[in-house]
Image (cartoon, helix red, strand yellow):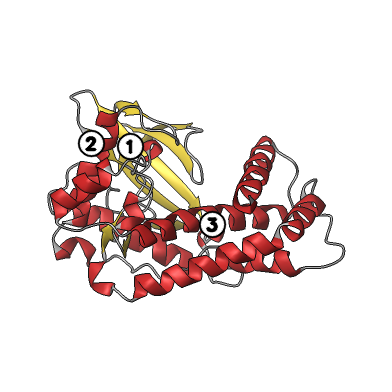
C-alpha cells in the first residue's frame, strides 16, 4: 500500500485507530493493539495474546468468505493472515473504510436496532462449520483475574505507583468478600457451561451498540471481531436481552436453540469480573492520573459498589 496520508482517529476503547488514504484514492481503517493488553496474565508471552487476536480476526475473515457480508473483516496481510506483528509488542490490522452511522456503548438506539443486531448474531451462530475453522474455543478464563484475586488478599502497604494505587488496594480489600462470592458463583456456572459442549457456536463476543454500524442503504454491520470465539450462544445474547424475553424468544424461533438463564448469568458475571480485574490491574501498575485513568476509576468504584450491594 502506497500511503498518501495518515490521520489518528480517537474512537472506540482498547485499540488505537487511524484513517489512511493511499495514493490510488482508497481509504482504509487501521487498528493497532498493544499485545500486553491481550494477555490473560502478567506472565503470559505476548505471542499468546497475538495468537488469540489472529484467530479471532481469521474467524471474521472466514465468516465473510462464507457469505456473511455484514461482517467487517480485515484485509489479508502479505502472509495471508488477518493481522501482522509490529515492533514485537503490537499487532496491526487493516480494514476497508466504511461510511455509515456509528453508535456508542450503552442502550440500543431503537427496537429495530436491537432486532437488527439479533438477526446478525443468529446468522453468525448458524454459519457453516468452515467459519469456525480458525477460531479458538472459550476457555472461560478472565483476563487479569490473578491480579484481582491478589488484590483481594493483599494486606499492608502497596507500591505508590500512581494516584490511584493505594486507593484501589483499599477499595478491593474492603469489598473482598463480595468479590470472592462473585468469582465463586462464576466458577460454578462455568461448570454448567462445560457440561454442554455441543451447544457451542461461533460467537462475536461483544455485539453491543458500539460494535455496530448502519450503512446509508439501511444495512446493519458488525465490527470489532477481536473477541470472536467458539462458545455457548449466551455469550452474544446476555446483553441483547432487554429483560422482557422478546429477544430470547426471537432467537429461539430463528435458531431452534433456547437460551439458558444460567448461562446468560454466566456471561453477565464475566463482563463485570473482567472489568473489575482489568481496572484493578491498571491501578496496580504505574499510572499518571490521565483523563483515561480518572474515567476508569469512576467506572471501577461504581462497579465495585454495584456488585457488593
Q: Which of pointers 3 and 1 lies earlier in the amino acid sequence?
A: 1
Left or right of 15? Residue 225 is left
Q: Residue at x 21, y 52 (%)?
A: 124
Q: Is residue 161 or residue 107 the one in the foreground?
A: 107
Q: Is residue 67 left or right of residue 200?
A: left
> Which x, y percent locates residue 129?
16, 65
Would you place residue 111 above or below residue 258 in this image? above
| Residue drawn at x 26%, y 41% as measured from the top left | 246
Label 1 Cα neighbours within 10 Å, binned few <14 / some 14-19 / many ≥20? many
Q: Secondary structure at mark 1?
A: strand
Which numbered disc, 3 or 1, marks the residue closer to the eye?
3
- The image quarter in which residue 106 lies: top left
Q: CA distance from mark 1 to mark 2?
A: 10 Å
- Residue 80 badge: none
Q: CA distance from mark 3 to mark 1?
A: 22 Å
Q: Residue at x 68, y 64 (%)?
A: 177
Give the residue at mark 1: 212
In this rendering, position of residue 249 left or right of residue 213: left
Q: Is residue 251 above or below residue 187?
A: above
At x 37%, y 50%, the residue is 238
Q: Position of residue 81 (x, y in %)?
A: 30, 59
Question: Does the residue at mark 1 contact the one at mark 2 (Cβ under 8 Å)?
Answer: yes
Depth check, mark 1 against mark 2: the one in front is 2
Task: Locate residue 298: give its quadrant.
Answer: top right
State the residue position of label 3.
274
Instruction: Quarter of the image for the N terminus: give it.
Output: top left
Residue receiving disc 2: 116
Q: Secondary structure at mark 2?
A: helix
Spatial CA distance of label 3 from label 2 is 27 Å
The answer to whether residue 26 of the structure is visible from this angle is no
Q: Are marks 3 and 2 in contact (CB under 8 Å)?
A: no
Amino acid at each position: 500500500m502506497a500511503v498518501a496520508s495518515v490521520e489518528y482517529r480517537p474512537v472506540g476503547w482498547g485499540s488505537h485507530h487511524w484513517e489512511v488514504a493511499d495514493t490510488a484514492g482508497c481509504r482504509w481503517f487501521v487498528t493497532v493493539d498493544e499485545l500486553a493488553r491481550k494477555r490473560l496474565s502478567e506472565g503470559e508471552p505476548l505471542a499468546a495474546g497475538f495468537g488469540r487476536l489472529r484467530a479471532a480476526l481469521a474467524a471474521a475473515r472466514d465468516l465473510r468468505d462464507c457469505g456473511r457480508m455484514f461482517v467487517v473483516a480485515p484485509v489479508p496481510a502479505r502472509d495471508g493472515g488477518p493481522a501482522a506483528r509490529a515492533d514485537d509488542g503490537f499487532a496491526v490490522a487493516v480494514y476497508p473504510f466504511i461510511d455509515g452511522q456509528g453508535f456508542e456503548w450503552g442502550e440500543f438506539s431503537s427496537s429495530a436496532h436491537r432486532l437488527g443486531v439479533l438477526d446478525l448474531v443468529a446468522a453468525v451462530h448458524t454459519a457453516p462449520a468452515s467459519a469456525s475453522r480458525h477460531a479458538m474455543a472459550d476457555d472461560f478464563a478472565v483476563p487479569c483475574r490473578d491480579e484481582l484475586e491478589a488484590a483481594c488478599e493483599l494486606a499492608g502497604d502497596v507500591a505508590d505507583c500512581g494516584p490511584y494505587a493505594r486507593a484501589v488496594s483499599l477499595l478491593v480489600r474492603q469489598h473482598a468478600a463480595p468479590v470472592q462470592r462473585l468469582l465463586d458463583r462464576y466458577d460454578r456456572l462455568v461448570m454448567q457451561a462445560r457440561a454442554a459442549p455441543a451447544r457451542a457456536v461461533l460467537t462475536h463476543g461483544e455485539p453491543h451498540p458500539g460494535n455496530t454500524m448502519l450503512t446509508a442503504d439501511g444495512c446493519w454491520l458488525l465490527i470489532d471481531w477481536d473477541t470472536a470465539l467458539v462458545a455457548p450462544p449466551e455469550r452474544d445474547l446476555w446483553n441483547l436481552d432487554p429483560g422482557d424475553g422478546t429477544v430470547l424468544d426471537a432467537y429461539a424461533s430463528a435458531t431452534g436453540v433456547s437460551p439458558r438463564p444460567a448461562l446468560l448469568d454466566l456471561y453477565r458475571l464475566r463482563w463485570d469480573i473482567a472489568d473489575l480485574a482489568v481496572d484493578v490491574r491498571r491501578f496496580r501498575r504505574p499510572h499518571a492520573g490521565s483523563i483515561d485513568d480518572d474515567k476508569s476509576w469512576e467506572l471501577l468504584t461504581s462497579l465495585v459498589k454495584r456488585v457488593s450491594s
